[in-house]
């Protein structure tokens, strides 16, 4: 699954793993140049690197998960679509203002399954990031999504949404064009659409910008994705007025897939290859495509009335509070 990206981006906690991988690569090259056997040493170092990777990724902090979810080499929506869809016909425009490249959507086929796919899309370089507004949709993006979801209902097609955004764009122009209303209209629409809806958080699931594509029958998350009402930076700025508190904010937000599964917010965690999705995009895409196919096929067997009732109950049951007696 080819995509443009920086040649290398190493996170702090990846440094020990990368150091071993560099040694392995140097040893292999030396063996070729000097024509000497190095299989045993390479095997030992590979096993050591695998063990170290497993140990490090088994105890990632919430803030490290945030860094991983934002990794510039991490696959985006169109990377996955290119990898597992046998056909994708992109549709454009909200028929009111313009087309928003931060949201992509259209007819997608996975094996024998035809769906309407809608997802947020970031850019790989500065130019593309500017065009895609760093994956932060404007109101016209959400109105485009709204239009495509209505089209899906008309043709009785299941809907698959891929969530990957820091949040909806908070600029003046977006507010003037009705950002809050556009998000609210999507929440209302998705709650009552008479077709199966599967949402997958593939990277960042930020605030209402994510929720505008996230009201669904089944919510899936990639293992190292995040999903939260606000970014750790925003939380730290509001609660502590101190950007150095981002690690504490990330812990408090309970934004990792494991936390959200324990809280009953999401329905399924999709495992990523050792080291994260950016280490093996092809395997991640295969796993993701299979999970989407399974979930949609399951939902298609449900009665429409029962589907809508369960969707309502799903969101009515989210969240609770405990009050201690005085």
Image (cartoon, rainbow, N blue to C red):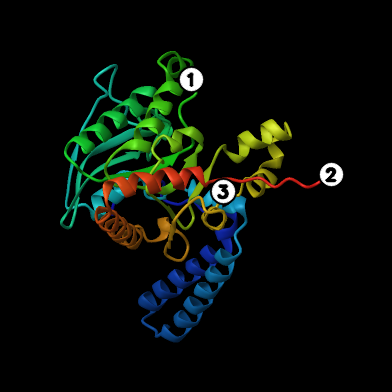
User: Residue 226 location in percent, x, y?
Assistant: 51, 48
**Label 2 packing within 10 angstroms: few (<14), some (14-19), many (20+):** few
Q: Nearer the viewer, mark 3 or mark 2?
A: 2
For marks 1 and 2 on the same chain, the one whose residue lies earlier in the sequence: 1
Image mark for residue 255: 3
Give whichever of 134, 118 is nearer the camera: 118
**Label 1 packing within 10 angstroms: few (<14), some (14-19), many (20+):** few
Q: Which residue is denoted by mark 1 in the rendering?
A: 171
User: What's the residue at 50%, 70% (across, down)?
Assistant: 23
Q: Is residue 317 above or below residue 96?
A: below
User: What's the residue at 73%, 45% (across, down)?
Assistant: 323
Q: Is residue 113 left or right of residue 33?
A: left
Q: Which residue is denoted by mark 2 in the rendering?
A: 326
* Residue 3 visible (yes or no): no
Gap in Å between the C-alphas at discs 3 and 2?
31 Å
Q: Is residue 227 left or right of residue 237?
A: left
User: Residue 263 location in percent, x, y?
Assistant: 56, 53
Q: Is residue 31 above or below residue 181?
A: below
User: Residue 124 location in percent, x, y?
Assistant: 37, 40
User: What's the residue at 33%, 40% (across, down)?
Assistant: 119
């Amino acid at each position: 699954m080819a995509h443009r990206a920086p040649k290398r981006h190493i996170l702090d906690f990846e440094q020990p793993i990368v150091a071993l991988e560099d040694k392995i690569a140097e040893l292999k090259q030396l063996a070729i140049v000097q024509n000497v056997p190095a299989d045993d040493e390479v095997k030992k170092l590979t096993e050591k690197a695998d063990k170290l990777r497993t140990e490090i990724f088994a105890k990632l902090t919430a803030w490290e998960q945030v860094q991983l979810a934002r990794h510039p080499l991490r696959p985006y929506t169109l990377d996955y679509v290119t990898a597992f869809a046998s056909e994708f016909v992109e549709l454009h425009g909200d028929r009111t203002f313009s087309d928003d490249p931060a949201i992509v959507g259209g007819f997608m086929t996975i094996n024998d399954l035809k769906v309407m796919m809608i997802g947020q899309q970031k850019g790989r370089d500065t130019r593309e990031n500017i065009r895609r507004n760093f994956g932060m949709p404007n109101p016209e993006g959400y109105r485009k999504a709204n239009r495509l979801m209505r089209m899906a209902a008309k043709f009785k097609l299941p809907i698959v949404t891929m969530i990957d955004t820091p949040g909806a764009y908070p600029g003046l122009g977006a507010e003037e064009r009705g950002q809050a209303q556009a998000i609210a209209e999507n929440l209302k629409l998705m709650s009552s659409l008479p077709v199966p809806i599967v949402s997958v958080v593939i990277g960042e699931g930020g605030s209402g910008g994510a929720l505008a594509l996230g009201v669904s029958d089944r919510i899936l998350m990639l293992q190292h994705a995040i999903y939260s009402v606000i970014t750790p930076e925003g939380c730290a700025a509001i609660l502590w007025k101190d950007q150095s508190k981002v690690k504490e904010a990330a812990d408090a937000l309970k934004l990792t897939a494991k936390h959200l599964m324990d809280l009953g917010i999401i329905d399924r965690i999709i495992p990523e290859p050792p080291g994260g999705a950016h280490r093996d995009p092809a395997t991640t895409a295969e796993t993701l495509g299979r999970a989407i196919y399974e979930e949609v096929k399951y939902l298609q067997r449900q009665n429409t009335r029962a589907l809508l009732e369960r969707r309502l109950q799903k969101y009515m049951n989210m969240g609770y509070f405990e009050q201690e007696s005085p």
